[in-house]
Image: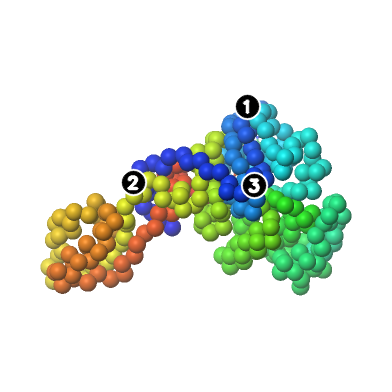
Amino acid sequence: MTTSTPASMPTVTSSSPATETVVEVRGLHKTYGATVAVADVSFAVGRGEIVGILGPNGAGKTTTVESIAGLRTADSGTVSVLGLDPQHDPAPVREVLGVQLQESRLPAKLRVAEALRLYASFYAHPKEPDELIALLGLADKRDTAYENLSGGQKQRLSIALALVGNPQIAILDELTTGLDPQARRETWDLIEAVRDSGVTILLVTHFMDEAQRLCDRVIIIDDGEVIAEGTPTELAGQGRTGVTFRMRLPQPPQPLDVTLLSDIPSVVSTREVGTALEITGGPTVLPDVIIALHSRGIVPDEVQTISPSLEDAFVALVGHSSQEIPA
Ligand SMILES: Nc1ncnc2c1ncn2[C@@H]1O[C@H](COP(=O)(O)OP(=O)(O)OP(=O)(O)O)[C@@H](O)[C@H]1O
């Protein structure tokens, strides 16, 4: 993650799926008593996409995906899942949409294979439990009770349970929360394999690296409204037109004359970051600086370009990082 922020505030973009729309949400509004959980949310998901729903705590992400799954009744707005209304057609929606929600809990003594067979029995055309056990890397845990699974194994089982009905669409809420770095990466590989098998995925996440790595498009929700939408690269690049890089300079006998850099036309700004110097400027700023330094016999160390990140865009839009809880 970089600490640099875009030069100007990103604007809201709107993008539509390139393929057939399988989920469409229009003007969704949902309150809990006096709390407006979802004020006005609209977006579409195309077949075969992995779409990320990002936003700070309490933004309305879970309420939105639960409304898509038919687990919440919206006050107004429409939700369409493959042309079906989850409120009016809950049974056919359950056949095409699998859900892995936050903190799924199972009975402590239920074994992995038993849980999958039980869930498979709820569906008309389930996947073969053994196939999922193999796909999810749970073969050596098939007879292990839920209470004896590690956090990562419980997470994989909950993904398997979301997929056992052989859904066309899967909603995964906080997929890798609580997992160690290796388990997170394995889970990402798994999600890509699930997508490659033809399942469209709607992923609620707080992790920008996860969204950047997995998602074809992301939708950022704040205070119950969509505030930005686009590919991770599009969103990350908003507001950043120039090039930023950092380098370390060898200690010369004389301190570097700062005008050497500030006189270069393509240099917009320089700042010290620890022992490194960060320079932002136009498209040619990197070679311009290297050539200017070279003319004084200075060869910089550890030159590193800084790519705009989704986290930068998120911070600019929402006002704090994705994992900070606002006061
Ligand atoms: N069952 C409920 N009863 C009352 N208020 C609720 C209920 N569920 C959610 N809320 C409130 O609605 C708002 C949106 O909650 P929601 O869980 O949809 O947000 P979220 O973006 O998923 O948050 P998080 O990232 O913390 O999971 C919050 O203010 C929350 O406190």
Q: Amino acid at mark 1?
A: Ala
Q: Tell me which residue sits at (84%, 52%) in the image.
A: 123
Foreground residue, 12 or 119? 12
Foreground label between 2 and 1:
2
Name the side, left or right, on which 251 lies relative to 187.
left
Quarter that holds the N terminus: bottom left
Q: Tell me which residue sits at (27%, 54%) in the image.
A: 282
Query: In the picture, residue 291 is in which quadrant?
Result: bottom left
Q: Does 239 appear above or below 303?
A: above
Q: Which mark is residue 7?
A: 2
Q: Tell me which residue sits at (51%, 56%) in the image.
A: 212
Name the side, left or right, on which 167 lies relative to 120.
left
Residue 25 is at least partly visible in this image: yes
- Kindly report the distance in space between the C-alpha atoms of the residues bearing marks 3 and 2: 36 Å
Q: Where in the figure is residue 93, as x and y percent of width and height?
A: 77, 44
Q: Which mark is residue 34?
A: 1
**Tag 3 residue:** 20
Q: Tell me which residue sits at (77%, 56%) in the image.
A: 166
